[in-house]
Image (tube, rainbow, N blue to C red):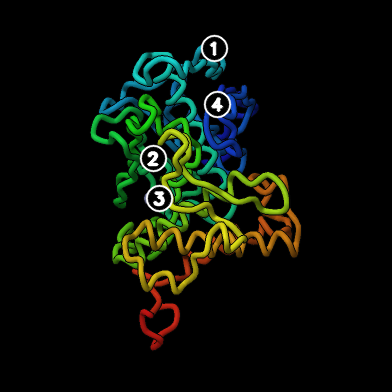
Amino acid sequence: MWLLSCLITPNILEQYRALPIFKQDLTEGFEFIENPQDPISSPLGWHNDGTTATNDTSGNNALVYVDQDTTDTTVQSAPGLVFNNTQDPDVSPSVKMNLDAARINLFYILNTMHDIAYKYGFTEAAFNFQQTNIDGVGLGGDRVLASVQNSLGIDNAIMPISRHRQSCDFGEFLGKFPMRDGALENDIVSHETTHGITNGMTGGGTGRCLQIVESQGLGEGWSDAMADWTEQVAAPISDFTLGCYVDGGVPIRSKPYSTNSTVNPYTYSTLLELGEVHDIGEVWANMLHNVHAALVAAHGFSKTARTDPSGSEGNVVFLHLFIEALAFQPCQPDCDSVSPGLGNT
Ligand SMILES: [Zn+2]
């Protein structure tokens, strides 16, 4: 308790020009966001790693930089933790103004995801990713290291997981419309971040418990479902399409997630024909989309669910079930571990 009270900095003011978490990508417009940091999830604010206060895109939850250079962060644009940098979609993602905007948005989303997940159970005791664990439990020294314009990640975004290095790399997408930065599509970022959550919570923080094909497929599905959850703004739950911006309007998944079986006909039996991990993920994410939609239809929608996990509305209940259940499942979850003896049909 003494440690906590000494570390908390009161009245931290943080401001970011970024894409609010409920928006999908930069085509929906940047906003100037004031104090998005959650005082319970991040009592130090987002710019203090427990030892040092910073004025750049580094802090206790994330360090966001360019390519391989962890010192290449974005520094505040004005004193007082103001990150007010504009983005120009007509020039290359690699020019400084766009690098700054991408780092700031990535930093904002990673920290927002940290704060949401913390409130629903991905805490320090549950092996979340923080440089300093303020309550002294779990493992520290593992904030997310996130790279924009990563030269090793062209046309991709990845989050390789290990216990002591949570890295998250966002490359430039060179599809139909080149110059699209994966760090400026929020659902890509929240998808990758959720790989950290599901790998972190399954099997007690080893980071090695979603590695067989079916478990990897579940992981891809959870990551899509979390991106889906973060971008819903009202009841009823809307159809959700992942990854439209980075590939020039062509979604990176085969179908929208939908309660309409004409829009998305995937069911469990679809797995008789599909075996690649992202394909398995599409089936699982569509199931989760339908569960989420049914809960919201029955119990309503909380507009404050991202910061208040105490309600009984459907979207609140869904995220509790989603995150808390991760800790109960065995290492390498699959059909057999959920329903022993039924086999992988
Ligand atoms: Zn993935």
Q: Which residue shows up at 64% across the image and 25% down it?
A: 34
Which kind of residue does numbered mark 2 sit on? Val
Read off the residue under disc 4: 18
Which kind of residue does numbered mark 3 sit on? Gly
Q: CA distance from mark 2 to mark 4?
A: 19 Å
Res 272 seen here: yes
Dot in front, 3 or 1: 3
Read off the residue under disc 1: 79
Element class at badge 3: helix
First in sequence: mark 4 or mark 3?
Answer: 4
Q: CA distance from mark 2 to mark 1?
A: 25 Å
First in sequence: mark 2 or mark 4?
Answer: 4
Q: Which residue shows up at 40% across the image and 34% down it?
A: 182
**Residue 258: quarter of image:** bottom right
Name the quarter where the C terminus is drawn.
Answer: bottom left
Read off the residue under disc 3: 196
Which kind of residue does numbered mark 1 sit on? Pro
**Horizontal arrangement in the rendering, residue 6 relative to residue 334 (left or right):** right
Dot in front, 4 or 1: 4
Q: How many marks are shown on the rendered structure? A: 4
Q: CA distance from mark 3 to mark 1?
A: 32 Å
Q: Position of residue 197 (x, y in %)?
A: 44, 53
**Horizontal arrangement in the rendering, residue 209 relative to residue 287 (left or right):** left
Q: Residue furthest front?
A: 262
**Residue 209: quarter of image:** bottom left
Element class at badge 4: strand
Q: Which residue shows up at 31% across the image and 22% down it?
A: 71
Dot in front, 2 or 4: 4
